[in-house]
Image (cartoon, rainbow, N blue to C red):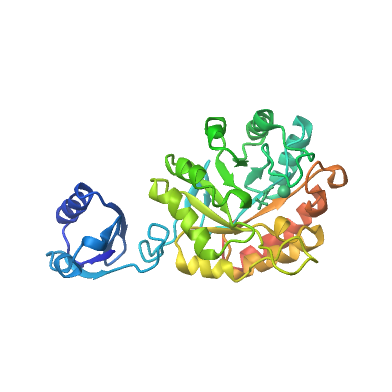
């Protein structure tokens, strides 16, 4: 339920109203715009009578939110949310590039890549330590040691780090990770989402291989309804009949999610295509269609990468791609 307050509503009356709703067990999302304050009420509002709420002195209008996603909904929070991840801001007006290897393989590898992508303009470093692999015989990541190496690279370069969590019992290991990634295969791991909702750690929520946009929004709702407002969506391609690319980038998802939600949306052109030659063209498309950033796989030696070599750019290819991306971001009047 959304309450638009009267223009001249006094702050003490607004505070009292919010307190009243909290005491009745509702969570609130308050947006103070230039002319009106909007209170988004979250919880079971089915028993609230719209006419009674409308008659409150400082309330101008009341609307029910029909969509099942509430906290995530742009109607609850008309302005774009900007998320602070280790000092780097992600969201409207900005464009943030996250880059790094699919998997952390060694100290030398991750530090070399981190220094290089930083020079090329990446603002955050990615690197998998716990890898969800289709085959149990494939490299599974360096686990806690991988996270330590990533933290080492953060210390050397100052880049905030992004890494995937697969198991809710590992949350303590991610204490110093700046953005926790929930991978496509865990988008509906509801226990994990609930646990992540208990902190304020930024979460990069990737769309599942065969999940709808509404399911993606509902997964973010799990995190936000627990109290964590720091969710970033990632469109990383979905399964279709097409086998020429690893997945099919659902480019229309980006403006659609931004219409439906106030949260930032970034694009992963690496997993969307599985092919390094397509990473730069899809990055351009992401910039043009209004994405808030990119997450790109980069490796110093893609031919010998332990995971996702064919879709990884080498250091020079990434540097060239960034020159192109930077020009296009400037054209969109965004700040990188
Ligand atoms: C990854 O980012 O390395 C990854 C496994 O991504 P996804 O969950 O999108 O497949
Ligand atoms: Mn990968």
The location of residue 274, given as percent across then percent down, is 77, 57
Q: Residue at x 53, y 41 (%)?
A: 86
Left/right of residue 187 with respect to residue 320 in the rendered view:
left
The C terminus - image quarter = bottom right
Q: Which sits in the foreground, 333 or 57? A: 57
Q: Quadrant of residue 173?
A: top right
The location of residue 138, given as percent across then percent down, is 79, 41
Left/right of residue 278 with respect to residue 152 in the rendered view:
right
Q: Is residue 166 above or below residue 311?
A: above
Left/right of residue 228 with respect to residue 13 in the rendered view:
right
State how many labels appear.
0
Left/right of residue 94 with respect to residue 48 in the rendered view:
right
The furthest residue to the front: 136
Q: Residue at x 17, y 65 (%)?
A: 53
Q: Residue at x 42, y 58 (%)?
A: 72
The location of residue 108, given as percent across then percent down, is 78, 32
Q: Which sits in the foreground, 265 or 8? A: 265
Q: Which sits in the foreground, 124 or 196? A: 196
The N terminus - image quarter = bottom left
Q: Quadrant of residue 57?
A: bottom left
The location of residue 169, given as percent across then percent down, is 54, 33
């Amino acid at each position: 339920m959304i309450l638009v307050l009267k223009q001249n509503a006094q702050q003490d009356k607004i505070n009292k109203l919010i307190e009243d709703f909290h005491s009745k067990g509702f969570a609130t999302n308050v947006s103070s715009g230039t002319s009106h304050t909007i209170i988004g009420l979250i919880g079971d509002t089915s028993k609230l009578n719209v006419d009674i709420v409308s008659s409150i002195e400082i309330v101008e209008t009341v609307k029910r939110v029909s969509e099942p996603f509430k906290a995530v909904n742009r109607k609850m929070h008309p302005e774009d949310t900007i998320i602070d991840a280790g000092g780097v801001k992600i969201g409207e007006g900005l464009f943030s590039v996250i880059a790094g290897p699919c998997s952390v393989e060694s100290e030398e590898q991750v530090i070399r890549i981190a220094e290089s992508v930083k020079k090329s303009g990446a603002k955050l470093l990615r690197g998998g330590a716990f890898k969800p692999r289709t085959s149990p015989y494939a490299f599974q990541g360096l686990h806690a040691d991988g996270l330590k190496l990533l933290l080492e690279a953060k210390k050397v370069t100052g880049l905030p780090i992004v890494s995937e969590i697969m198991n809710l019992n590992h949350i303590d290991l991610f204490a110093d990770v700046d953005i926790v990634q929930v991978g496509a295969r865990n988008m509906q791991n509801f226990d994990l989402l609930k646990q992540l909702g208990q902190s304020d750690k930024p979460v990069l929520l990737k769309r599942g291989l065969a999940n709808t946009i509404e399911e993606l929004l509902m997964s973010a709702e799990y995190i936000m309804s627990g109290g964590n407002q720091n969710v970033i969506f990632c469109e990383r391609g979905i399964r279709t009949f097409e086998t020429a690319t690893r997945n099919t980038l659902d480019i229309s998802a980006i403006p659609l999610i931004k219409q439906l939600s106030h949260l930032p949306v970034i694009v992963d052109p690496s997993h969307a295509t599985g092919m390094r030659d397509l990473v730069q063209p899809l990055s351009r498309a992401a910039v043009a269609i209004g994405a808030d950033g990119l997450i790109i796989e980069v490796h110093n030696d893609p031919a010998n990468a332990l995971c996702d070599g064919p879709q990884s750019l080498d250091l020079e290819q990434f540097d060239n791609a960034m020159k192109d991306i930077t020009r296009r971001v400037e054209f969109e009047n965004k700040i990188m």
